[in-house]
Image: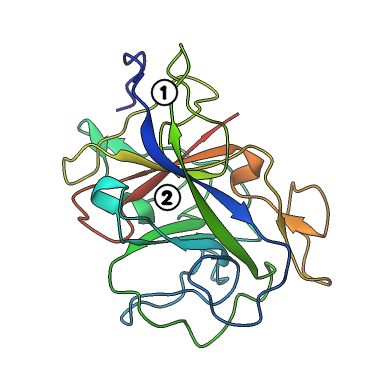
Amino acid sequence: MIERGVTPIREGLPAHTVEVGTEPLDRPARNSVGGRPFLDGSQDWPECFCGERMALFFQLDLPPDLGPFGGDHLLVFHCRAHNDATEAPYADGRLVPRYWEAPQPPYPGPFWRVLLQRRATDPFPEAEPSVRALPLTLRPFVDTPDTRGIGAQAFKVGGTPSWAQDPEHHRCACGTDLVYLCQVPEGMEFAVHPGQPEQPYSLGDDSYWLFLGNEVYLLACPAHCDPAAVWPVNQN
């Protein structure tokens, strides 16, 4: 169940801003927008419920100072054809079993997949065809919340989320409370190659959005009960 009104955290926490480079990538890179995803050898490229392969929006290696997620490899996929916001599926006070595969009304399944990999050593043979491959650089900083408990509004990992609405706290199907991991700012555009199909509800044919361009907060299971045990909160 969503909990609201939690006392704000005022202590500064380790965080890293994520900067998107401008020079196109011509080789595999673990920190990238688009590119060749680094997946566990047993995993396939995620597909949307519609059968279309999801676009790789970004991936990055998480720094060691990010608590239970330090050293993990984060990948964020989203369907080009289905651009919408999420709705948390709950039962008995926690997210339903395998919530990352649960229906997302009005759809019969999810249109996104977020993965935390611990054995992602080799790049996938194919590159993301739609989203332009660009490098990502992580810059460390201390994210000190303001008087309302709001952290820096940025593309970042770690720190404290800059909640656009009330803070949300979710419990994993395994019974562990999810922990904030990453934030994507509202309205962030991901450039696509010319000639790609236009994404519904986006600004045009030259970029895609995540979750309708909402501010996105990734909450992950610190118990690592499954690589896909991550819930994307959407606010605006």
- The residue identified by callout 2 is 103
Q: Is residue 46 visible?
A: yes
Q: Is residue 28 left or right of residue 178?
A: right
Q: Is residue 206 left or right of residue 57?
A: right
Q: Residue at x 27, y 44 (%)?
A: 96
101 w.r.t. 94: above or below: below
The earlier-in-sequence mark between 1 and 2 is 2
**Residue 45 x, y percent position in the rendering:** 46, 75
138 w.r.t. 43: above or below: above
Instruction: Please identify the quadrant where the N terminus is shown.
Output: top left
Quarter of image, res 171:
top left
**Residue 214 x, y percent position in the rendering:** 61, 37
| Frontmost residue, 63 versus 204 | 63
- The residue identified by callout 1 is 167
Q: Is residue 89 left or right of residue 162?
A: left
Instruction: Please identify the quadrant where the C terminus is shown.
Output: top right
Callout 2 secondary element: loop
Q: Is residue 11 left or right of residue 226?
A: right
Which amino acid, by three-letter code, is at mark 1? Pro
